[in-house]
Image (cartoon, helix red, strand yellow):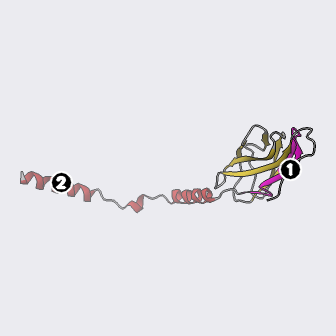
Amino acid sequence: MKRTVITLSLVSALALFSCKEKASTKINAENVEVAAERDTAAKSLPVMSFDKSEHDFGTIEQGAPQETIFSFTNTGDAPLIITDAKSSCGCTVPEFPKNTPIAPGETGQMLVKFNGSGQNQVTKTITVTANTAKGSEILRIQAFVNPKGAQGAAIPLKK
């Protein structure tokens, strides 16, 4: 039994050390350069910078359609691609350049339409999904909506 264990140990040690080759001789310099370029490119990300993140329509009459434009600039190092923009309800509709690359330094616009529904103070959000580091941006619109044909329109109180 001892002989078997010693023999297996010697054979294992011999196999382990005899197969040892220098790993550095197997490295291909071209592959290292390609990997370094790929890693550098992966660190380059677009950055979506909006001229404003909120818009206040002020006091409006119920059902009166409203529109605003949110302008943005790609201040990052890679093309910006907006994949989606969703509002918090169906009364707000964003229009945007879907899946269109926006090069670094270029600008774009997002048109947001609001149908004027609701009453009193109304706040809606638009979530913009893009290939940025954060992955999404939040925009807000707000208005004070008076009922249609109301006598003596309400005036929102300032905080």
Instruction: Specify the amino acid type for callout 1.
Output: Phe
Q: CA distance from mark 2 to mark 1?
A: 83 Å
Indicate which disc residue 155 carries: none
**Quarter where residue 7 is shown:** bottom left
Q: Could you say where residue 19 lies in the image, as x and y percent from the top left?
A: 29, 56
Q: Is residue 142 left or right of residue 17?
A: right
Q: Which residues are magenta?
A: 48-69
Q: Could you say where residue 40 lies in the image, as x and y percent from the top left?
A: 60, 60
* Residue 89 seen anywhere in this rendered image of the structure: yes
> 28 or 86: nearer the eye?
86
* Residue 107 seen anywhere in this rendered image of the structure: no
The residue located at (75%, 37%) in the rendering is 90
Q: Are marks 2 and 1 in contact (CB under 8 Å)?
A: no
The residue located at (9%, 51%) in the rendering is 4
Instruction: Specify the amino acid type for callout 2.
Output: Val
The residue located at (60%, 56%) in the rendering is 42
> 153 or 8: nearer the eye?
153
Q: Say which label, 2 or 1, has the lower sequence index.
A: 2
The residue located at (33%, 59%) in the rendering is 21
Task: Name the secondary structure under disc 2.
Answer: helix
> 113 or 118: nearer the eye?
118
Residue 37, magenta (yes or no) = no
Residue marked by disc 1: 57
Mark 2 surroundings: few (<14), some (14-19) or many (≥20) residues within 10 A: few
Residue marked by disc 2: 11
Q: Could you say where residue 149 lies in the image, as x and y percent from the top left?
A: 92, 38
Task: Name the secondary structure under disc 1.
Answer: strand
